[in-house]
Amino acid sequence: MSPPFEPLREKLLAAGMRPVGVRRYLAELADHYEDLLAEEEESGKVGGIARSAALARLGSVDDLAEAMMSHSRFRSLAARAPWALFPGGAVLGLVAGYAATTLLMLGAVDTFALPVGTHLMPPAWLPPVADAVFGFDRYSFRRCSAG
């Protein structure tokens, strides 16, 4: 982007315009500026004088910004309806997260459910490992309570 349009870009983004719309608008303005600059150079003006004349013909930053800001369709959703996006978006995201988690859990239960009447048994290697890690055998509680 050329330097004369940087203040315009900042002003439009600060006013809540969509970044995509701002890029397109500035690209069109840059094309018009190049055309006006070529016309000014053909009329005999050179260098900074031609650039100043082309920018003057294009309009001031305030006029160019007002031309875009006057149309609400160029505003971002956050600028048009912040009440719906920020609190509403947070609540909607929370509800969607809970729903997704619930659906995943239900899918896991259906996938890994055991037939009725079966018991989930630990693998054969688990009791000896647990005995070694925790320092007692699996019958020690029975001996203590019986004794």
Image: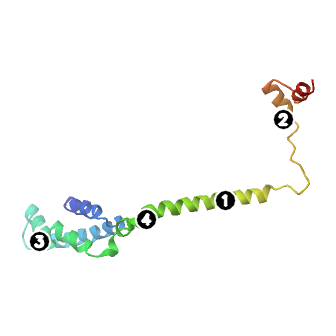
Of residues 55 and 98, the one nearer the viewer is 98
Q: Earlier in the sequence, mark 3 or mark 2?
A: 3
Which one is in front in this view, the residue at disc 2 or the one at disc 4? 4
Q: Which residue is drawn at the image coordinates 6% and 70% (left, top)?
A: 44
Q: Secondary structure under badge 3?
A: helix
Q: Earlier in the sequence, mark 4 or mark 1?
A: 4
Image quarter hosting the N terminus: bottom left
Q: CA distance from mark 2 to mark 4?
A: 51 Å
Which amino acid is tagged 2?
Leu
Percent position (x, y) of residue 13? 29, 62
What residue is pinned by disc 4? 85
Residues at marks 4 and 1 touching, judged by CB atoms closer than 8 Å:
no
What residue is pinned by disc 2? 126
Percent position (x, y) of residue 17? 31, 67
Which amino acid is tagged 4?
Leu
What residue is pinned by disc 1? 102
Q: Secondary structure under badge 1?
A: helix
Q: Is residue 114 left or right of residue 84?
A: right
Q: CA distance from mark 3 to mark 2?
A: 86 Å
Which amino acid is tagged 1?
Thr
Q: CA distance from mark 4 to mark 1?
A: 24 Å
What residue is pinned by disc 3? 40
Q: Earlier in the sequence, mark 3 or mark 1?
A: 3
Q: How is the image coloured?
A: rainbow
Count of residue discs: 4
Q: CA distance from mark 3 to mark 4?
A: 47 Å
Q: Secondary structure under badge 4?
A: helix
Which one is in front in this view, the residue at disc 3 or the one at disc 2? 2
